[in-house]
Amino acid sequence: MRIKIGENADENAPVVALEDRGAVPTVAAYDNIILGYPVQFSNAPKMVRDLITENAALWNGKNVLCLVTMGAFSGDGAGCTARLLKKCGATVLGGLHIKMPDSVCDSKLLKKSADENMLIINRAEEKIGRTVLRMKSGKFPRDGLGVFAHAAGLFGQRLWFYSKTNHYSNKLKINKTLCTGCGKCVRVCPMKNLTVENGAVSPHGKCTMCYRCVSLCPQKAITLIGDEVVEQYRFENFRR
Ligand SMILES: Cc1cc2nc3c(=O)[nH]c(=O)nc-3n(C[C@H](O)[C@H](O)[C@H](O)COP(=O)(O)O)c2cc1C
Ligand code: SF4
Ligand code: SF4
């Protein structure tokens, strides 16, 4: 989705995945950026924080809207990158938290029905629509940016789960009996964390917990937080 920010915004501004080689040059080419990511324990994924800090000079002078998706609660999910971006010299235009169907597909606890997920998507679209209208009149959302959100994120989650988001994860589990060595997980991993050797997949401790491989493995051979794949999520499952 493209959102027009400001009077001189480029309607054809590109959407680029953070892991793409073109991400850094694309950010460099534009003044107004929407940085989107899923919240993890009221923090930004390690990959997102690394992209900011390892390219600190890139953000100097940029205007950034932090757009965060969440399963339920994200505290200061937008604030986490907002603070990093400000240190790099960026102006934070706003923060937007959007509830989406949960991607953690190896836990029964978080599983919702297709109807419930459709409702969540409809509400997300409505919130985005309302927000875009307000942004056109110069009013930017402040989700996750205030002092109360900071305290909620820090004391509600980040302090207790810091060990999970401080490093890349080495907790990915591959069921070698189920794995056929097809290589699909290797191709979708944004971290190049997976390799196939002698017909079996191995993780290399650099997982940013995106859940792509867990959701896409045809054999349901990969788990991360849970121990069994309950349902693999596909965006098209929920289209009207
Ligand atoms: C490791 C991990 C931690 C997560 N922590 C949170 C959290 O603290 N709060 C929350 O609401 N959702 C949490 N989620 C759920 C994701 O944020 C959610 O699935 C995602 O935003 C869905 O949106 P997407 O369609 O952009 O992936 C977590 C997911 C993972 C994989
Ligand atoms: S996608 Fe699944 S079956 Fe294919 S190589 Fe990866 S773990 Fe094995
Ligand atoms: S969840 Fe899978 S695809 Fe995502 S970073 Fe980890 S290993 Fe790669």
Image (tube, rainbow, N blue to C red):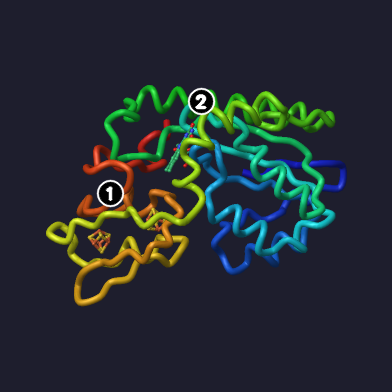
- In this rendering, the count of numbered labels is 2
Q: Identify the image quadrant of residue 125.
A: top right
Extreme residue toward the right, this view:
7
What is the x, y in percent for residue 128? Answer: 63, 30
The residue sitting at 20% across, 54% down in the picture is 219
Q: CA distance from mark 2 to mark 1?
A: 29 Å
Q: Given the image, on which type of amino acid does mark 1 rest?
A: Thr
Residue 230 is left or right of residue 65, and the answer is left
Instruction: Determine which residue is flagged by label 2.
Output: 122
The residue sitting at 72% across, 42% down in the picture is 65
Instruction: Determine which residue is flagged by label 1.
Output: 223
| Label 2 SS | helix
Q: Given the image, on which type of amino acid does mark 2 rest?
A: Asn
| Label 1 SS | strand
Q: Earlier in the sequence, mark 2 or mark 1?
A: 2
What is the x, y in percent for residue 53? Answer: 67, 59
Extreme residue toward the left, this view:
177
Cβ atoms at labels 2 and 1 below 8 Å apart: no
Q: Is residue 86 above or below residue 196?
A: above
Q: Is residue 84 above or below residue 180?
A: above
Q: Quarter of the image for the N terminus: give it.
A: top right
Q: Residues within 10 Å of mark 1 (few under 14, many from 20)?
A: many
Residue 182 is left or right of residue 53, and the answer is left
Mark 1: is the Cβ under 8 angstroms from ligand 3? no
Q: Is residue 181 above or below residue 39?
A: below
